[in-house]
Image (spheres, rainbow, N blue to C red):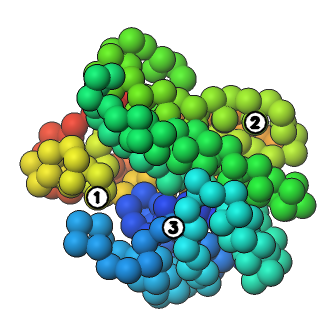
Amino acid sequence: MPNLKGKTLFITGASRGIGLAIGLRAARDGANVVIAAKTAEPHPKLPGTIYTAAEEIEKAGGRALPLMCDIRFEEQVEAAIQKTVDTFGGIDICVNNASAISLTGTLETPMKRYDLMHSINGRGTFLTSQKCLPHLLKSSNPHILNLSPPLTALKAKWFGPHVAYTMAKYNMSLCVLGMAEEFKGRVAVNALWPKTVIATAAVQNLLGGDETVKVSRKPDIMGDAAYAILTKPFKEFTGNFVIDEEILRAEGVTDLEKYSMIPGGNLAPDFFVD
């Protein structure tokens, strides 16, 4: 069976949540995991730092490289990628997980917040992919994976309440659509999105707190779903907009209850999922 042993993953925003879950699943195979994120010091509302994430990765069986990196800045991304190549010899997988969110309407969205979302979500994803690609093209099974919604959900109801955020997230999906075509046969480019709300810091702090967490799934489901994508042959699986539970069912996973924060409870659907 294919696995990620010895593969190098460059994961943005991997100090916590979904990014960390993807790194931990890869670490169980003995992968090299780069934690490219901004949190170096403990934060009262955000669990974990790049260093605590590195400890978890190594306990899980992987090799970790914690790097402070703000993907809004080209020089920081370039430096992080160079350090990755110097340390591990290359890059096999780029996971664009870092994202900013503000669920505000047009009149309530300051341009500073608009610029932050677009700088991280769309531009940051494009920039990180661009800088990783020369190294990915040398890999035996190269993948780019964006944590972004399916384009089939391009509907007015997802734009009306928070148009600035939705535009920023769909920019990540447009990167998948374009790069999958541009690099077809050379690098796999796919998107992954959850069917239900995932218990992350954003959910805890911005989307309802403890009550929403109760109707959420653990980030582990996204780690396992990403693993299913990243272990597929790059020439055979590209340009897909994948929903977590759908790919796991296709892989033969029948027990999705283990991912629920409260087993047996109702689950809240995520944004951009009908």
* Position of residue 151 measured from the top left corner of the image (x, y, whole percent): 54, 23
Report the residue marked by disc 3: 37
Name the residue furthest front.
Answer: 111
Report the residue marked by disc 1: 201
* Residue 214 visible in image: no
Give the mark nearest the N terminus, 3 or 1. Answer: 3
* Position of residue 13 measured from the top left corner of the image (x, y, whole percent): 49, 61
Q: Nearer the viewer, mark 3 or mark 1?
A: 3
Residue 179 numbered mark, or none: 2
* Position of residue 10 measured from the top left corner of the image (x, y, whole percent): 65, 65
Horizontal side of 210 relative to 95 (left or right) equals left
Residue shown at 41%/28% (left/top)?
164
Give the mark nearest the N terminus, 1 or 2. Answer: 2
At label 2, which amino acid type do we have?
Answer: Met
Cα separation, mark 3 vs mark 2, equals 23 Å
Cα separation, mark 1 vs mark 2, equals 30 Å
Horizontal side of 124 relative to 87 (left or right) equals left
How packed is label 1: few (under 14 Cα within 10 Å), some, or many (20 or more)? some
Numbered disc 2: secondary structure: helix
Numbered disc 1: secondary structure: helix
Residue shown at 62%/46% (left/top)?
125
Relative height, residue 115 to residue 127 (above, below):
above
Horizontal side of 161 relative to 75 (left or right) equals left
Relative height, residue 122 to residue 43 (above, below):
above
* Residue 255 visible in image: yes
Q: Residue 191 occupies which quadrant of the picture?
A: top right
Q: Nearer the viewer, mark 3 or mark 2?
A: 3
Q: Quadrant of the N terminus?
A: bottom right
